């Protein structure tokens, strides 16, 4: 065990701060609820029965552990470091989001809540929430921006099939940030019976910590699996960052391993120097949105700017507060990939490995494709394939100019 | 004595509650918005709650969000909001002005610089919806130093333990959110609000205004019987939205809104007679 005082894994402080980031910036109506949730989570965290139930579900319902797959043909294709894919795409529901949803719904049940709400961008978190709500028989409402509903129709259908009600959000940019505003409004109005399952490592304390803890299964498994096949830790771990849940889950277990380099990859949209991008850590400045202080895309009056990315899951003008802190600490380096680079990675992985990645994950792959050729052949990269790309075929076809 | 203290002392002497209209600065445009604000005191406004527009007002309902977006579209900024207060103060030195908004535009402005500029402009109080007592020291200290009160929110979910936390550092007056919900969507239960006010008055000497869900002169009058003030917001800005949608000329809009405010004020002021 590392000494906690020297550990990069000891945050947040009791008020939810990661250095200058995080916190609980919420309306008074929600404050008592947020404090209750924090207490309930602390209780659950210390209850072996909670972990036993969660681990059982992760194994038999989600199918964990999922493989750390050596992408031999991609490695040869790039001609550098060995590339390992962490196959979150093979989870039940097709993405990493289910890891967190199971943890949160078990907590909701412990707290006696009877109604589940969630926000979703790409629809992956909405599908995962609808799935766990179905599994435990709770009614579920998912808020989704109208723009996202349009570009993620298959997921809207899946959520409906799972018994959830998808409520379109027509305010603002009609994407993830607006869906989150609407979910928070619902929560404020239904505090007595409602549990809000946040899908990203963002929002007010304790969500960033809680979501991170539930997603750390990704990095913990990578560590054990890499040790088993390579007899060492990876030299580099990579994940895409929107709000940052798969990334923080991938990175956190490695923060104190100084030999491991860590790269997060944001969405640069049409380019980081355009207004059509979502590279919050690269181009943003600190501010307060959705309950925490973190980097934000904002104008010079402090109004939130609309983000853009080809991938709905990365199309968010904020980022989880722990990422902001890790950026300032210099422990994690943040890069970006454009829509075009992500599309190239999307088609390359499909053709070379027979794996269609989610467009979100394709951003992480795009970075790996840039950097792997510059690394020695005995180096090992672990990249988290956060989801599968079936949901993205319509968007990808449109980007490639193909009519389906 | 601050403008807020003076105003509540005067109201107490007259045994009446304050009528507190809410408008968003720059809605639907800077000139019309200022013209409405300027006329409010003569229409019976005892305090004015002025919304500082924000793109993502997550504790507000659709009406207040739409007002923010109309204002931003017509070019509203925090600097222009403060300019509007400065202009108002040229002719009105008595009516307290409370800025209601979200933390990010203030954070971006810089809390110390904001407190100085807001104080100089003539702002008397701040309601910063997403800045709970646990996080507000960074704004409270400079604001108080410039004579600005931090108006704390209390909600139906605020329990006795939390009440103490909220009251510590509160000044000016308190604001009771009458429903667990966002602005302009639910209707309050008068007997529940009255019970909550009794609990708050027992715990604090500060006056307590009530807002959220007050839409008609009758409802405003009902609240004014036991609260120190009644805040009406969504009903006013919804009216602005409807007038804009019907293509009303600025003069018609200003007249309609100020007439509506007068009917609310009359009801509030007659409530304890």
Image (cartoon, rainbow, N blue to C red):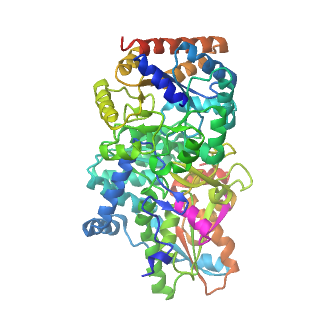
Rendered position, B162 above or below B261: below
- Which picture quadrant has residue A188? top left
At 44% across and 69% down in the image, what residue appears? A216
Rendered position, A325 above or below A194: below
Residue A133 percent location from the top left of the image: 33, 51
Residue A393 percent location from the top left of the image: 56, 54
Q: Residue A327: within the magenta?
A: yes
- The extreme right residue here reads A273
Rendered position, B143 above or below A73: above
At 65% across and 77% down in the image, what residue appears? A372
Q: Nearer the viewer, residue A367 or B7?
A: B7
The magenta span reads A320-338
Residue B170 percent location from the top left of the image: 45, 41
- Which picture quadrant has residue B252? top right
A65 lies left or right of A230:
left
At 55% across and 28% down in the image, what residue appears? B3
B110 lies left or right of B62:
right
Q: Residue A348: within the magenta?
A: no
Q: Is residue A163 visible?
A: no
- The extreme front residue here reads B1
Residue B143 percent location from the top left of the image: 57, 42
Q: Nearer the viewer, residue A92 or B195?
A: B195
Q: Is residue A329 visible?
A: yes
A313 lies left or right of A64:
right
Q: Nearer the viewer, residue A331 or B153?
A: B153
**Number of disc labels:** 0
Q: Nearer the viewer, residue B154 or A166?
A: B154
A178 lies left or right of A378:
left
At 32% across and 28% down in the image, what residue appears? B193
Rendered position, B223 above or below A319: above
| Quadrant in which the N terminus of chain A appears | bottom left
């Amino acid at each position: 065990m590392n000494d906690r005082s020297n550990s990069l894994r000891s945050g947040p402080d009791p008020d939810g701060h990661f250095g200058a980031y995080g916190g609980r910036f919420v309306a008074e109506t929600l404050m008592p609820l947020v404090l209750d949730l924090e207490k309930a989570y602390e209780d659950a965290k210390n209850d072996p029965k909670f972990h036993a139930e969660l681990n059982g579900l992760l194994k038999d319902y989600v199918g964990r552990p999922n493989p750390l797959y050596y992408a031999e043909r991609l490695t040869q294709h790039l001609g550098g470091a060995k590339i390992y894919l962490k196959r979150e795409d093979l989870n039940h529901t097709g993405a990493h989001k289910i890891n967190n949803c199971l943890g949160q719904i078990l907590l909701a049940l412990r707290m006696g809540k009877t109604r589940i709400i969630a926000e979703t961008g790409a629809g992956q978190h909405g599908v995962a929430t609808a799935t766990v709500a179905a599994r435990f028989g709770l009614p579920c409402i998912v808020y989704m921006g109208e723009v996202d509903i349009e570009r993620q129709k298959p997921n809207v259908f899946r959520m409906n099939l799972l018994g959830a009600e998808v409520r379109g959000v027509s305010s603002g940019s009609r994407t993830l940030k607006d869906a989150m505003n609407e979910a928070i409004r619902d929560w404020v109005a239904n505090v007595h019976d409602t549990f809000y399952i946040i899908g990203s490592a963002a929002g007010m304390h304790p969500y960033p910590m809680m979501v991170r803890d539930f997603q750390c299964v990704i990095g913990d498994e990578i560590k054990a699996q890499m040790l088993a096949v390579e007899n060492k830790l990876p030299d580099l771990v990579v994940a895409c960052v929107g709000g940052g849940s798969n990334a923080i889950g991938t990175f956190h277990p490695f923060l104190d391993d100084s030999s491991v380099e860590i790269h997060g990859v944001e969405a640069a949209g049409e380019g980081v120097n355009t207004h059509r991008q979502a590279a919050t850590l690269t181009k943003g400045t600190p501010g307060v949105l959705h309950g925490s202080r973190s980097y934000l895309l904002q104008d010079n009056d402090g109004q939130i700017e609309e983000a853009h990315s080809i991938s709905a899951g990365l199309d968010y003008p904020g980022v989880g507060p722990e990422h902001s802190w890790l950026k300032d600490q210099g422990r994690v380096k943040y890069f970006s990939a454009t829509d075009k680079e992500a599309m190239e990675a999307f088609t390359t992985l499909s053709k070379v490995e027979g794996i269609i990645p989610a467009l979100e994950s394709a951003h992480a792959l795009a970075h790996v494709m840039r950097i792997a050729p510059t690394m020695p052949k005995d180096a090992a990269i672990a990249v988290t394939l956060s989801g599968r790309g079936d949901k993205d075929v319509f968007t990808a076809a449109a980007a490639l100019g193909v009519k389906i | 004595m601050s403008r807020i203290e003076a105003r509540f002392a005067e109201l107490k002497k007259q045994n009446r509650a304050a009528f507190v209209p809410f408008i968003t600065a720059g809605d639907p445009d800077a000139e019309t918005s200022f013209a409405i604000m300027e006329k409010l005191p003569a229409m019976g406004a005892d305090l004015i709650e002025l919304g500082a527009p924000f793109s993502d007002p997550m504790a507000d309902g659709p009406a207040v969000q739409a007002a923010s977006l109309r204002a931003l579209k017509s070019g509203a900024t925090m600097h222009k909001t403060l300019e509007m207060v400065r202009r108002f103060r040229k002719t009105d030195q008595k009516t307290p002005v409370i800025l209601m908004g979200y933390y990010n535009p203030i954070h971006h402005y810089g809390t110390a610089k904001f407190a100085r500029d807001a104080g100089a402009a003539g702002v008397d109080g701040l309601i910063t919806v997403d800045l709970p007592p646990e996080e507000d020291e960074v704004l409270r200290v400079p604001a108080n130093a410039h004579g600005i009160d931090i108006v704390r929110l209390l909600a139906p979910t605020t329990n006795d333990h939390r009440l103490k936390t909220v009251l510590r550092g509160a000044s000016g007056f308190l604001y009771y959110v009458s429903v667990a919900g966002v602005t302009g969507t639910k209707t309050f239960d008068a007997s529940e609000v009255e019970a909550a006010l009794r609990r708050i008055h027992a715990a604090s000497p500060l006056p307590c205004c009530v807002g959220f869900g007050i839409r008609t002169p009758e409802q405003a009058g009902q609240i004014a019987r036991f609260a120190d003030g009644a805040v009406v917001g969504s009903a006013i800005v919804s009216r602005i939205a409807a007038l804009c949608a019907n293509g009303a000329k600025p003069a018609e809009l200003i007249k309609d809104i100020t007439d509506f405010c007068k009917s609310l004020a009359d009801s509030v002021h007659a409530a304890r007679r």
